[in-house]
Image (spheres, rainbow, N blue to C red):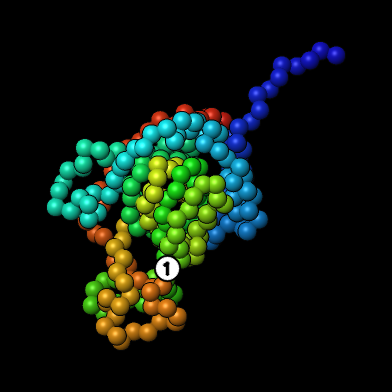
Amino acid sequence: MARGVPQPQSSRVQALYELCKRSFPSPSAAGAASSSPPPADVIRSISSLMDTITPADVGLRDYNLEDDRGHGFFGSDLLKGSGRLPRWARPIKYLHIYSCDAFSIAIFCLPTSSVIPLHDHPGMTVLSKILYGSIHVKSYDWIEPTVLARSQPARLAKLHMDDVLTAPCPTSILYPQSGGNLHCFTSVSSCAVLDVLAPPYNNDAGRLCTYFHDYPFSSLSAGRRKVAGDPDKYAWLEAINTEVNVYMQTGMYTGPTVQELQA
């Protein structure tokens, strides 16, 4: 029997794309339910696959050879009063893998000490896999029904996570109304994060990325408001209405390319 030509083994990136393609309907097709989180079995399948993805699977091989330094947020205390970045600062790199109206796949490569400031994911489910390194994550969820501060336009949120995550660790998941939908990242070491957003940001669809300042609960409560449990687990979040300058550049993704499925 004649042997056929050996077919190349599908990459984990391709497998992730195909699983997401099967799992996430386009927001237009999903209609009003598009802001609801995907079924639990879908999330388990995708997170289990992401748990197996290594830096080499996405073209990141010599990731830990440099002690690079960066600073992702112009507005931090380190740069207060200066519009310039330190000479040693290196940008956060955004590596695009795939996107459509239903989901996107990308990698963020953060030099040591980089910051992605506190921001939200309206109506979105996000799966994040730390590929290498360590990153500090601080995240919140809104208190429902909405509680507003009396003295300024800030809204009450509850702390979900304030911890350092180090690879290898399980894939993190946030949902439209739980799991730490608002989060900020500070890289403890050089690190990379693989993200799946479902659906992705889309200004025309009302999924805008909004940045926030967080204030301790006691700072705007004036002793009049009470919360259940430890007040330190709550914060007032105020939207930043001016432009937020994140020191980020688009980099070149060098991993396996995605072969799109035909509709």
Of 76 and 167, the residue lying toward us? 167
Quarter holding residue 22? top right
Quarter of the image for the C terminus: give it. top right
Residue 132 location (% of width, % of height): 48, 42
Q: Residues within 10 Å of mark 1 (few under 14, many from 20)?
A: many
Q: How many marks?
A: 1
Quarter of the image with the N terminus is: top right
Identity of the residue drawn at 26% across and 79% down: 150
Q: In the rendered view, tell whether residue 48 sits above or below residue 3.
A: below
**Residue 20 relative to residue 205: left or right:** right
> Which residue is outermost to the right?
1
Q: Is residue 99 left or right of residue 19?
A: left
Relative depth, front residue between 160 and 41: 160
Give the amino acid at mark 1. Answer: Leu
Snapshot quadrant of residue 209 = bottom left
Residue 49's quadrant in the figure? top right
Q: Nearer the viewer, residue 167 or 155?
A: 167
Residue in the foreground of this view, choosing between 238 and 171 = 171
Q: Residue at x 57, y 40 (%)?
A: 53
What residue is rendered at 26% in x and 83% in y?
A: 222
Residue 29 visible in the displayed image: no
Q: Position of residue 54 (x, y in %)?
A: 55, 38
> Considering only vertical position in the picture, is 145 above or below 259?
below
Pointer 1 residue: 159
Residue occupying the point 63% across, 48% down: 48
